[in-house]
Image: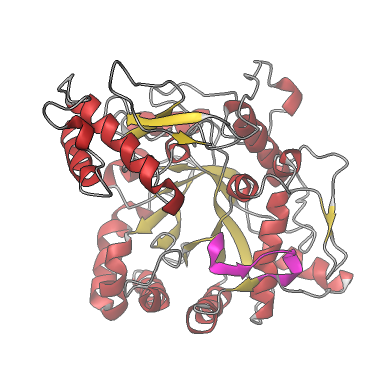
């Protein structure tokens, strides 16, 4: 990544006092709604209070949620959907209308403090939205000013893959395709409006992708005697999250914006996942979240090696395990709560509970090493049958003889049920395409199992890890 250089101690202290004085170090929670079994907004707000969260981020401007947040002391972050960015960027009147409809009616009673334009827009291939992002942010800011709303900061959350280099932290560099045309004007806007660079930072994924070389305790804030020294700055790191945040800080400095503040829009650790997803378990999730809360809420603020003493506002992902999130199993298991509202483990987002006071034992982790053996891909429980039927058709249309065995009269035709036919098709598809990037996901309809579902003459294809 890139080198930040050093700031004289006296000027750094002045800068921290200016930039952090009004920023709360309280931790919040991301309230996602991709589940068909989640509590109501009013019940959810009470649960958010029970977690002692002082911030909440929602991924839209849901009026039922905003009404439920009325007269609470919770700072709220709302979001403009990705699909509206292009039109808002080209129309001040549309921007004004969105703010008038989604912000103005609630602003006097709900502590809306952040308005995020889209979500991880720069992560995926450009669909025409990239170059509309900063103009849309400018228009939304102008709309807030038109309505005399002064307490809301405008930003946009980015995944860490906006960086093309992040190691060592001092080499932090934004991707060349977005650095000049998008990131630099965005930083200019954030700097001018005293807003934040919102980043989704997940040490879990960095560790899981490179667990042979990154110590798990280092990712979980447990590595008492394990440190990393950046050769470019001689700064010493004690955890992976600090490395990630400083990589962003150095990247911003490289573009001429060393003072733009960082806001952790999402961080967390999954409490479960697919069989091939290492380290996703309750023990690690509780350990990471408790430790990161302790770090971020400590007073005076700890900051990071490159930004000592800086307050880092943060929001943990997520409130619930959301059963309709697509992707690998971890995507549906980042919650602090089960959908019935009970805690998956003891947690206090205020940071007031000492780690020693969490008394309920955590289940020992069983998947901190990669799974080795055969696994199969089956239809998950409780999923939509129509969607399963569509996924079955897709799987059978791919590859070579993927579904021959479930044709009438063939060895796996009976039992003639959607569950068994789709499970065979999922396993057959995955066995053929895993090496090329195929997954056992099917938009959340599938799950992995180490138990061989084969029976009689019907042999299900498997994947060996």
| Residue displayed at 34% across by 69% down | 147
Where 389 sits versus 115, above or below? above
| Residue displayed at 39% across by 69% down | 125
| Residue displayed at 68% across by 67% down | 249
Which residue is more in the foreground, 401 or 298? Answer: 401
Residue 73 in picture, x, y percent from top left = 49, 42
Where 192 sits versus 371, above or below? below
Res 252 → quadrant: bottom right
Which residue is more in the foreground, 209 or 354? Answer: 209
The region drawn magenta spans 160-172
Residue 50 in picture, x, y percent from top left = 51, 28
Res 231 → quadrant: bottom right
Say which quadrant the N terminus sits in.
Answer: bottom right
Res 87 → quadrant: bottom left
| Residue displayed at 20% across by 37% down | 404
Res. 70 in view = no
Q: How many marks?
A: 0
Q: Which residue appears farthest toward the left when viewing the image?
A: 408
Residue 174 in picture, x, y percent from top left = 59, 73
| Left or right, residue 56 beside residue 163 | left
Task: Check residue 200 for magenta coloring.
Answer: no
Task: Check residue 171 for magenta coloring.
Answer: yes
- The image's colour scheme reads secondary structure
């Amino acid at each position: 990544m890139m080198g930040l250089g050093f700031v004289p101690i006296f000027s750094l202290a002045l800068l921290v006092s200016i930039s952090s004085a009004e920023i709360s170090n309280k931790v919040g929670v991301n309230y996602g709604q991709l589940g068909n079994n989640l509590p109501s907004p009013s019940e959810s707000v009470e649960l958010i209070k029970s977690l002692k969260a002082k911030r909440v981020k929602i991924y839209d401007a849901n009026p039922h949620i905003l009404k439920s947040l009325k007269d609470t002391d919770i700072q709220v972050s709302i979001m403009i959907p990705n699909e509206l960015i292009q039109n808002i960027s080209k129309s001040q009147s549309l921007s004004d209308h969105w703010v008038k409809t989604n912000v103005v009616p609630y602003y006097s009673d709900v502590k809306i403090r952040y308005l995020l334009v889209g979500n991880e827009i720069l992560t995926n291939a450009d669909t025409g939205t990239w170059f509309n992002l900063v103009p849309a942010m400018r228009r939304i800011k102008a709309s807030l000013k038109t309505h005399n709303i002064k307490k809301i900061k405008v930003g946009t959350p980015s995944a860490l893959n906006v960086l093309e280099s992040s190691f060592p932290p001092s080499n932090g560099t934004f991707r060349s395709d977005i650095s000049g045309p998008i990131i630099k004007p965005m930083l200019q806007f954030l700097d001018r409006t005293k807003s934040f660079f919102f980043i989704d930072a997940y040490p879990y994924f960095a560790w899981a992708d490179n667990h042979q070389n990154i110590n798990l305790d280092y990712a979980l804030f447990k590595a008492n005697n394990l440190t990393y020294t950046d050769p470019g700055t001689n700064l010493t790191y004690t955890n992976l999250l600090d490395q990630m945040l400083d990589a962003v800080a150095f990247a911003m400095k490289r573009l001429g914006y060393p003072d733009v503040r960082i806001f952790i829009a999402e961080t967390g650790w999954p409490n479960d996942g697919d069989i091939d997803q290492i380290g996703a378990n309750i023990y690690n999730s509780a350990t990471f979240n408790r430790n990161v809360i302790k770090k971020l809420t400590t007073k005076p603020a700890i900051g990071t090696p490159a930004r000592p003493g800086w307050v880092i506002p943060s929001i943990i992902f997520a409130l619930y395990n959301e059963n309709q999130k697509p992707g690998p199993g971890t995507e549906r298991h980042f919650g602090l709560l089960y959908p019935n509202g009970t805690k998956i483990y003891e947690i206090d987002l205020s940071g007031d509970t000492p780690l020693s006071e969490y008394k309920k034992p955590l289940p020992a982790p069983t998947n901190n090493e990669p799974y080795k053996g055969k696994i199969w891909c089956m239809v998950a429980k409780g999923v939509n049958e129509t969607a399963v039927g569509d996924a079955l058709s897709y799987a059978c249309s791919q590859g070579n003889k993927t579904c021959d065995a479930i044709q009438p009269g063939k060895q796996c035709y009976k039992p003639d049920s959607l569950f068994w036919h789709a499970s065979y098709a999922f396993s057959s598809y995955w066995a053929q395409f895993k090496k090329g990037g195929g997954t056992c996901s099917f938009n959340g309809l599938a799950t992995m199992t180490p138990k061989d579902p084969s029976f009689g003459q019907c042999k299900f294809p498997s994947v060996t890890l």
